[in-house]
Amino acid sequence: MTQLIVLPHVELCPDGAVIEAKPGVSICDSLLQNGIDIEHACEKSCACTTCHVVVREGFGTLAPAEETEEDLLDKAWGLEPTSRLSCQALVGEASLVIDIPKYTINMVSEGKH
């Protein structure tokens, strides 16, 4: 099991969390399995940016993002060089420090579909 350290997020994880994640499972699924209800409006199909996270530590240990993910990340709120869509980034053997941005852009919930 790999340790994921989730930094505090006002709504989803106010005190932060340290969770155990199975290698090969997406960051999104790992968070959801541990009670951190990260938004995933497209049901994890790499069609939105609502599951955007910033990997503060361990980014270099993740497999590179595919082109589709890279294209979507350009639309994410608060994009940083170590941003990933958590539905696409698979946990490896190295610990990760995850920061869930305060905001997401959800075209469906904002009535822009």
Image: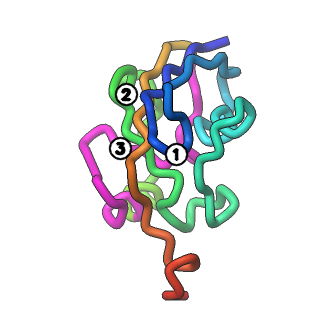
Q: Mark 1 points at which residue?
A: 11
Residue 74 in percent (x, y) is at 31, 62
Residues shaded magenta? 72-92
Q: Distance between the residues labelled 3 and 2?
A: 9 Å
- How many marks are shown on the rendered structure? 3
Determine whether 8 is above or below 86 in the image: above
The quarter of the picture where the C terminus appears is bottom right
The tag on residue 59 is 2
Callout 2 environment at 10 Å: few (<14), some (14 to 19), or many (20+)? Answer: many
Q: Mark 3 points at which residue?
A: 83
Amino acid found under the numbered disc labelled 2: Phe
Q: Nearer the viewer, mark 2 or mark 1?
A: 1
**Lower position in the chain sequence, tag 2 or tag 1:** 1
- 86 inside magenta stretch: yes
Furthest toward the right, the residue is 33
Callout 3 environment at 10 Å: few (<14), some (14 to 19), or many (20+)? Answer: many
Secondary structure beneath dot 3 equals strand
Residue 28 in percent (x, y) is at 61, 42
Amino acid found under the numbered disc labelled 3: Ser
Q: Is the stretch drawn in magenta largely helix, strand or loop?
A: loop
**Lower position in the chain sequence, tag 3 or tag 2:** 2
Furthest toward the left, the residue is 81
Corner quadrant of residue 27: top right
Determine whether 81 is above or below 97 in the image: below
- 69 inside magenta stretch: no
